[in-house]
Image: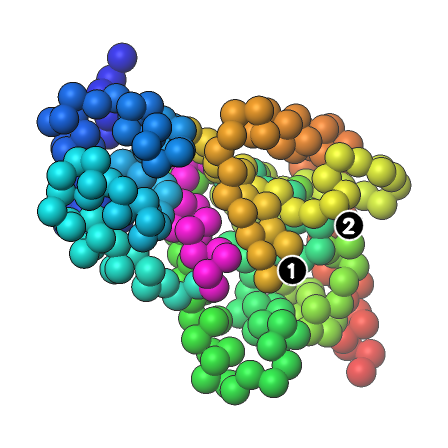
Amino acid sequence: MPGPKKLDPSSSPRALLGAELRHRREAAGLSQEDLGAPLFVSGSFIGQLESGTRRMQLDQAQKLDEVLDASGFFVRNCAALKKSKYPDHFAEAAEAERLATTIREYAPLLIPGLLQTEAYARAVFRAYQPTATEDVIDELLSARLERAQLLADPTTPLLWVVLDEAVLRRRVGGPAVMAEALRRVATLAQQHRIIAQVLPFSAGAHMALTGSLKLMRFPDAPALAYLQGLGTGQLQDDPAALHRYELTYDLVVASALSPEASLALIQSVAEDYDHEDQQF
């Protein structure tokens, strides 16, 4: 079995902490489970800290300094991890997303952030914060577009999205914005950069009716699920919960249109928006 992936401590504060945590844990002769016990977390969580897929919290840093006799190293460096371009509820998920090799997402209401056009994203942020200054909106938009650069790599991560039909029908920003946004999704699917499916209204009730779902897999760490609500977000790594979320996603996929039929529907709706825009 291959050993743990070698981290580059210079690549980010999180990688630095992960590399140091692994070094000190192994030097102390502790397994990940051994180290997780006094922190009241699982061994897999310690593995995620070491691989950089989870963010270390201050209380965890304090306990690690104590257990590993690290003379305050983790507390001193933990502050750097709190700096993020993203809202607090999404920051950890965005950083994990960057390390994922596979991302599977069910989107019930909006085009996923990685696929949004600039105009679509601007309309979303303006709706979220109707009284924000343009500088605030521009800052949010810049982070969103930078995040989308994840797809610049031709193969990694594998991105598989299931869009509820409501995503296609919800008029975010008006017909011209919607036409452009849906064409981007269609183009990425045609270029085989993403797998895109549509869950039609005719599918009726399904397991993911209550919200969005994102599943992420990594080369050297346990999988994560991200659940998002109104101004909230939660990463989960509990194996039983992950099993249920994976089953949920699989059943959503089974009820969705095929990729070919989905592409045809996305293109058709985009054309409808184009025609509507030309009438004004």
Q: Toward the viewer: 259 or 25?
A: 25
Answer whether residue 98 is magenta in the image. yes
In whole angstroms, how far apart are the C-alphas of marks 1 and 2?
A: 20 Å
> Is 197 left, or right, of 63 in this rendering?
right
Q: Position of residue 173 (x, y in %)?
A: 68, 73
Seen from this angle, which residue lies furthest top? 1
Q: Residue at x 55, y 83 (%)?
A: 132
Q: Amino acid at mark 2?
A: Glu
Residue wearing tag 2: 165
Part of the protein shown in magenta: 87-102
Mark 1 Cα within 10 Å, few/some/many (few <14, many 20+)?
A: few
Q: Residue at x 18, y 56 (%)?
A: 76
- Residue 171 sits above or below residue 208 on the image: below
Q: Position of residue 145 (x, y in %)?
A: 45, 64
The mark found on residue 230 in the picture is 1
Q: Toward the viewer: 209 or 255?
A: 209
Residue 81, visible in the rendered structure = yes
Q: Secondary structure at mark 2?
A: helix
